[in-house]
Image: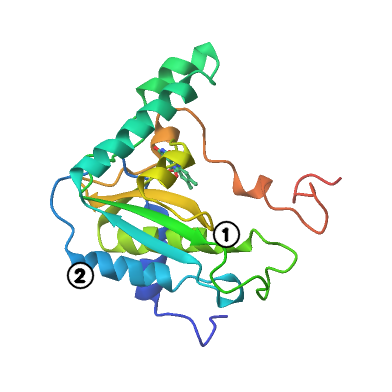
């Protein structure tokens, strides 16, 4: 039965559409500027994420300067070259062929950070799991990503960069952790499926194999 608190069918469809059609964007950015007002809407969405003890540990560092983007790209290129060496020979060339960032082409880059000391040493919900502030900030990233999809704006997450490069470039204080470096902009199109899936790198896993009942490993079909 439908909950009396549910959204209308149309509103629900919008939420699920944003979730299913959100993509990590790297190659499809256009140079159409992202207006301040629109970017702000995305940041408001991020800022409404859940956070442990309502800590709201995030900051959003907006980068539009091309020179800064070029420097970040240099950092990416270094980490990307190092990363290629970690793959086995048969995968290395395929890995090298993937476009894994849109740092210079996207009009806005966004560094999302987590201030680990935001509300002092003792935080509700973070007493025995101190990493919960990091998880909270990831929730903010996801909110932004989904809101961006609804607005027709693409977001790409770049993690192939040494954290220290970003710390130095943006003068981050010691108490602040890097969570995400995002590329944001209008796109020519949203690919229908994850690019790694399309390229045959990995498939989407069957959900039923990931759901367990009562004990680890006990799926609907497999009794442990
Ligand atoms: C924490 C995190 C880090 C990621 N880092 C990168 C990255 O460095 N480069 C990249 O091209 N994609 C990166 N991605 C995007 C994933 O590859 C992508 O989400 C996944 O392949 C599924 O595709 P989809 O987001 O289009 O559904 C990252 C995603 C997450 C959640």
- Check the picture and name the quadrant holding the N terminus: bottom right
Q: Which residue is mark 1?
A: 135
Q: Position of residue 27 (x, y in %)?
A: 27, 37
Question: In the displayed structure, would residue 20 be above or below residue 97?
Answer: below
Circle 1: element type: helix
Q: Position of residue 143 (x, y in %)?
A: 42, 64
Which residue: 74% across, 53% down? Answer: 212
185 or 166, nearer to the observer: 166
Q: Name the residue at the bottom extreme.
A: 4
Q: Is residue 148 left or right of residue 130?
A: left
Q: Position of residue 118 (x, y in %)?
A: 53, 70
Q: Distance of mark 1 from mark 2, alpha carbons?
A: 27 Å
161 or 139, nearer to the observer: 161
Question: In the displayed structure, would residue 62 be above or below residue 40?
Answer: above
Tally the numbered discs: 2
Circle 2: element type: helix
Which residue: 53% across, 71% down? Answer: 50
Point out the quarter of the image occupied by ligand 1.
Answer: top left
Q: Which residue is mark 2?
A: 37
Place residue 86 in its image quadrant.
top right
Q: Is residue 50 left or right of residue 194?
A: right
Q: Position of residue 77 (x, y in %)?
A: 36, 28
Can you see residue 121? yes
Q: Name the residue at the top extreme.
A: 89
């Amino acid at each position: 039965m439908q909950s009396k608190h549910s959204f209308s069918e149309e509103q629900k469809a919008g939420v699920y559409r944003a979730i299913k059609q959100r993509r990590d964007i790297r190659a499809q950015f256009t140079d159409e500027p992202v207006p301040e007002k629109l970017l702000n809407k995305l940041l408001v969405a991020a800022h409404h994420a859940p956070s442990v003890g309502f800590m709201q540990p995030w900051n959003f560092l907006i980068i539009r300067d091309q020179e800064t983007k070029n420097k970040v790209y240099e950092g990416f290129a270094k980490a990307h070259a190092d990363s290629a060496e970690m793959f086995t020979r048969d995968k290395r060339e395929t890995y090298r062929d993937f476009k894994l960032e849109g740092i210079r082409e996207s009009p806005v880059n966004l560094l999302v950070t987590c201030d680990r000391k935001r509300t002092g040493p003792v935080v509700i919900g973070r007493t025995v799991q101190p990493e919960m502030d990091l998880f909270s900030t990831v929730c903010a990233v996801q909110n932004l990503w989904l809101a961006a999809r609804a607005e027709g704006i693409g977001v790409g997450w770049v993690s192939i960069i040494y954290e220290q490069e970003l710390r130095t470039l943006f003068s981050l204080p010691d108490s602040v952790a890097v969570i995400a470096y995002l590329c944001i902009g209008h796109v020519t199109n949203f690919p229908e499926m994850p690019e790694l899936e399309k390229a045959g790198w990995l498939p989407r896993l069957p959900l039923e194999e990931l759901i367990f009942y009562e004990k680890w490993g006990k799926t609907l079909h497999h009794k442990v």
